[in-house]
Amino acid sequence: MRPFTYERASSPAAAAEAVRRTPDARFIAGGTNLLDLMKLEIETPVHLVDVNGLKLDSVEPTPEGGLRIGALVRNTDLAADPRVRRDYGVLSRALLAGASGQLRNKATTAGNLLQRTRCPYFYDTNQPCNKRRPGSGCAAIGGFSRQLAVIGGSDTCIATHPSDMAVAMRVLDATVETVKPDGATRIIPIVDFHRLPDDTPHIETALEHGELITAVTLPKPAGGAQIYRKVRDRASYAFALVSVAAIVQPDGSGRVALGGVAPKPWRAEDAEAEMPRGAKAVAARLLADAKPTHDNAFKLPLVERTLGAVLAEAKG
Amino acid sequence: MKFDTPATTNPIDRLAVVGKPTPRIDGPLKTTGTAPYAYERHDAVPDAAYGYIVGSAIAKGRIAAMDLADAKAAPGVLAVVTAETAGPLGKGKMNTATLLGGPEIEHYHQAVALVVAESFEQARAAARLVRVTYDRADGSFDLAHAKDGATKPEDGKSDSNVGDFTGAFAAAPVTLDETYTTPDQTHAMMEPHATVAAWDGDRLTVWLSNQMIAWTAGDLARTLKMPKEKVRLISLFVGGGFGGKLFLRADTVLAALGARAAGRPVKVALQRPLIANNTTHRPATIQRIRIGAERDGTITAIAHESWSGNLPGGDPETAVDQTKLLYAGANRLTALRLARLDLPEGNAMRAPGEAPGMMALEIAMDEMAEKLGLDPVEFRIRNDTQVDPVQPDRPFSQRQLVECLRRGADRFGWSKRNARPGQSRDGRWLTGLGVAAAFRNNLLTKSAARVRLDKQGRVTVETDMTDIGTGSYTIIAQTAAEMMGVGLDRVTVRLGDSSFPASAGSGGQWGANNSTAGVYAACVKLREAVAGRLGFNSADAVFADGEVRAGNRSIPLAQAAGDNGLAAEDGIEYGDLDKRYQQSTFGAHFVEVGVDAATAEIRVRRMLAVCAAGRILNPLSARSQVIGAMTMGVGAALMEELAVDRRAGFFVNHDLAGYEVPVHADIPHQEVIFLDETDPISSPMKAKGVGELGLCGVGAAIANAVYNATGVRVRDYPVTLDKLLDRMPEVG
């Protein structure tokens, strides 16, 4: 078999240092994505650092009135947390729109942010994929691209980020707390956390090698109507064609982020200024630079229509 | 037993056991996880090594070179099998492409090597070290492009021409001429194709997951160039087949070759990402339908042409056959054309022929009804026929299509449907109702069984029939219990073993009627043996309550069996009743859908199937089959599509994340009604197939309901939201 070594980390910094020491090491938490990718030999780590014992699994209030969500809080537990349900409804709804009950029981908050694309060409190791094998090319461009990005892609990659939770985190202005191998910590705003592919689609986040997510922090509640609407061909257990996370205030102002359309949760603050003018105006600004393919051009009107339905729902 | 005159009264008609809703006798094994599936036969083969298949990375071309050195040197590796090392191989009659490719490559993910190792993980890791260099060749991967070069298949059986279609169509006051498409689809069964193979000298035993034991035994022997008597197949349980396991596939051939090379038993399960391209699939179709009618709705002209593609030597998807039989009309035309494609091989899947054919025909009927200003139920009733419209001297043995439509319309509340589309709304949902006829032929094929009676009075049935989750074990036990006059608890059923008499097998909804008729025949012979031993006239003997009675004598079966027991073997063979009569099954599907007014997401709200399919042997397992088939219909209508990469020539979404089938949330409410029917023309069981009937028509009923909800007519399956979006109402 393809051998790998395994260790249980004793502290977040020790975990980070353990990964740093080995170039092809990975953290493992829920394993719901990594293990599948290992079975397909898309991920081939030589060393796994298990972070499950690090006690990063509680949700605590912050002095600023927000919530600090431990990196290992399971998706099921986070969605069910009464404070999340009361004050961050968009997050609870996004979590419950994702995966299946069994997967949510295992999947963690940090792991959800780090899940990899579901582009079918990424999954087929016979096919060129710049994300899987940098420089090999992109079979998705010019191929079957119904699920893939309409905006934010590049000439090297048009993969989408599959997470629902991350879209809600983006609209909530969450921040990602990390620890580096030397013990230093930093805080990364969610907007800066996921990277666009440009010419390095294999680099997906701002994390350095070995840097471990310890928590995701939500600012104080934003109020408003909080809606997550996921559009898909089947009723459950499918990735979004398009999703909309929205926080709409009684005066019609608010925030919007999109899933299923881009390599990262897609939000444009300048588009939000258009919210009182309605979905058409917001969608036009959000997707102004869209470059859809023949297969996925429908996502543009779908975003506008879904957003329209979300804004109507928010109005009540 | 030759069945060549219609059945009269026989012991099955007592219906003491047959016809009763009966839970599966194998249910406890399945619910406790103890039913042995092929890959788990540790009981039979405790020391199997593991095989892992390498699939071709190109769709068409040649292997220029293979470097096996690293794979062979990898930890735990016992053998590497390739076409070069396997020795001469034949090809199964039912196979189009060879199951071990090289040097020629015929399709993507065609197996090119098997790596055998001590553990699964070692085999998988070593498989990645097999380095193959290919010379890629251009191929034909686009049906729409290849269509114009399509030719009439050799047998030409699907082509028919009655009266003067062209003239009648030109003269008809109301006409329809539309083209419909259905995509490539994969079976997506839960259990992958899997085999454990073990050699004993020159004899080979394979434990596999297979629907058709006799076919596959023959093809395995043919492929390995060995006598059929020296191969034994055992397939006790099948975790879904849907036509994908009718045939010998690469798992079995490569497990056998791997076991020979490694010198020990080997097990192989097709890796999930290989299945869509390595095995068979349902080919895409392009179908043109023309219907001409009088203003009163009488069809005067009907034509159905279908184009599909396949590898050289492969067959077309027979999507036009139901159109020869379903509706009246004096002038008729059907034609099938086959294009050459270099995609993986097409073959049977979930009601081949009628499933995609009805998806097109029954939209066309809905469109035509609208043009005529007729209710679609009434339009179908108006064009009913009780005889084969192509050969009017052949009546249908039973045909209750009209009753199915009327009963279903009544039950479903069809009269509440607004014929004008886009008028019904329930909150955010546009709602609509749709109907389609259901039609599937009933096929007769010989089937044999052996029945033993032991000194405890227990009855054991042996036949190579398979249970693919359909309930074969149970209906065969019911048949034997009825015939021998014992309770179900006194019957043991042993299936899926090539050392047993050859049965009809499971496919084409022919399994239930034929296999139980074979068991009936064997039981008749056993009854004669029992009567003979007791000195009874077998015609007078009554078998009931564990006893044999004649006149005032009554003797326990156990006693009649004697110390050595009694055994009988026989089968059912058919005369020409299926030539003199057309045997088909009929039904009606009714569906309500909701379509989200903003996003055009389509969700089925409720479904009803009314089926007329001869005697229903077990209403419980028959219902399970029909609701499963209706679920497949939802998949075909709304989501299932193998996406073709037309540059590289393969199905891209080749796993269960990319190829969507319905989940529980997609299937809210299903109802099934079986009409009372016995068909004495079909067999002594008076039964017919029903499983696939539950699928044929569902897709169109859904598409028609979507039209009724939205006013958008989608003729290209699957009906997905992107095909509706630009004609949906403003979001407001």
Image: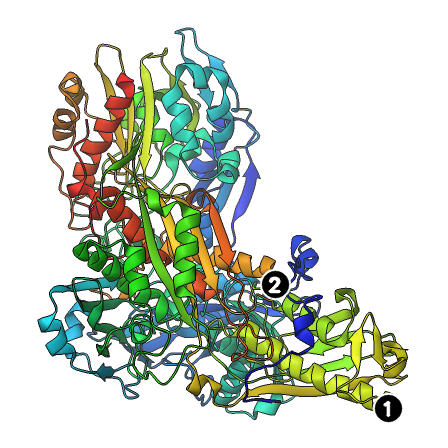
| Residue holding disc 2 | B618
Q: Amino acid at mark 2?
A: Asn
Viewer-closest of B198 and B431: B431
Q: Amino acid at mark 1?
A: Gly
Q: Is residue A41 above or below residue A97?
A: below
Q: On the picture, is B502 further left or further right than B547?
A: left
Where residue A40 sits, quadrant-wise, is bottom left
| Residue holding disc 1 | B535
Q: Residue at x 86, y 82 (%)?
A: B551
Instruction: Report the colour scheme.
Output: rainbow
Q: Is residue B303 above or below residue A133?
A: below
Viewer-closest of B335 and B5: B5
Q: CA distance from mark 1 to mark 2?
A: 34 Å
Say the numbered circle drawn on residue A60: none
Assign a secondary structure to mark 1. Answer: loop
Viewer-closest of B396 and B662: B396
Where residue B483 sits, quadrant-wise, is bottom right
Chain letter of disc 2? B
Assign a secondary structure to mark 2. Answer: loop
The outermost residue toward the bottom is B227
Residue A212, percent across and down?
43, 30
Classify mark 1: residues with Cα within 10 Å, few (<14), some (14-19) or many (20+): few
Q: Quadrant of the C terminus of chain B?
A: top left
